[in-house]
Amino acid sequence: MLTVAALYHFTRLADPAVLRGPLLDCALQNGVKGSLLLAREGINGTVAGTRQGVDAVLAHIRSLPGCADLDWKESPASEMPFGKMKVRLKREIVTMGQPDVDPTSRVGHYVDAAEWNDLIASPDVAVIDTRNDYEVAIGTFAGAIDPGTRSFSEFPQWWEANRAQFHNKRIAMFCTGGIRCEKSTNWLLQQGVTEVFHLKGGILKYLETVPADRSLWQGECFVFDKRVSVGHGLVPGHFSACGACRRPVTPEARLDPVFEEGVCCPACRDEYSVADRARFRERQRQMKLAEARGEPHLGA
């Protein structure tokens, strides 16, 4: 059994480029795979490997400037959910596009998973899902508002267009692991919203700790690895990922005539050119050839 660790931490990193090489080397030397983002505002990502390997990478991250109190969420995986290890340099570790947002200064009130149900059941609380539309589509909390955003950078515009309906409400927000809410709550506080709450540890912590018979979660939770989705207890879900657009695909959608493994799904049927489809088709062919040879395909 492998360990999957999802993590993020906001801290001021003076020169992320200097940190990239040693962090990548640590992961590779310990057989850990996944994806980590480094930016001046901190670190974000998910890694997987043996218990010993993941512990080594987490220890390395905790040794970085300001990361000693790093928090993370773990789940098991029966097989490696990542094809390789990547450490990338980014402008933001989660892109909101608001230069004045600073989660290290202040954020909303953290709400533990055990207390979340009582909060969102209050009639004066508006519950907002800050994730992308395709994530919300496969699962969310009962009664939560879906902004319908295609990317997190659209959230501020959505709020400005809809803020009037929340003038007498307390705001409770949630996301997969908590990172988006660090930024969105800071941003709402800057906009003059006085009572802002967010789910500590995100949906993943809720699904890990709240029993299914007491849960207000409906559906599954999208995750950014080969598991695609998880349910209560963080057990792998029932979705696969489209090889073209990476959106989650239901078993029923795989039966749609437009679905082609690695090339197209019903959600992206109108989104790519003929040349793109040809490229996807060749990639899928190469993946099948590699699988037949018992080799990994680097482009998978």
Image (cartoon, rainbow, N blue to C red):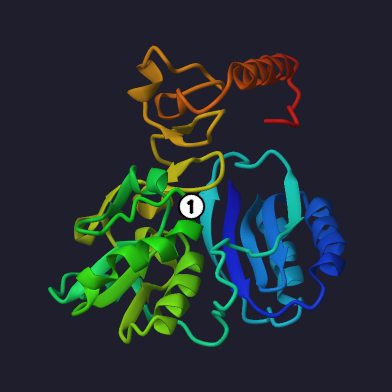
Viewer-nearest residue: 98 or 28: 98
Rendered image quadrant of residue 91: bottom right
Residue 227: x, y in percent? Answer: 51, 40
Q: Is residue 155 left or right of residue 122?
A: right
Placement of 251 over or under 61, stated as above or below: above
- x and y percent of residue 100 in the render? 57, 78
The residue lying at 39 percent from left, 12 percent from top is: 257
User: In the figure, 286 relative to 186: above or below?
Assistant: above
Quadrant of the rendered structure where residue 296 is?
top right
Displayed quadrant of residue 117 = bottom left
- 247 horizontally vs 166: left or right: right
Q: How many marks?
A: 1
Q: For residue 108, say whether it is visible.
A: no
Q: Amino acid at mark 1?
A: Ser
In the image, 251 versus 186, the foreground residue is 186
Asked whether residue 253 is in view, the answer is: yes
Q: Which element type, helix, strand or loop, lies under badge 1?
A: loop
Residue found 32% across the figure and 87% down from its top: 194
Q: Quadrant of the C terminus?
A: top right
The location of residue 198, given as percent across then percent down, is: 37, 74
In the displayed structure, does residue 246 sit left or right of residue 235? right
Disc 1: CA contacts within 10 A as few (<14), some (14-19) or many (>=20): some
Q: Nearer the viewer, residue 168 or 182?
A: 168
Q: Is residue 82 left or right of residue 229?
A: right
Can you identify the residue that label 1 sits on?
A: 151
Question: Please, which residue is most extreme toward the left here?
Answer: 123
What is the x, y in percent for residue 57? 73, 63
For image coordinates 40% across by 77% down, the residue present is 188
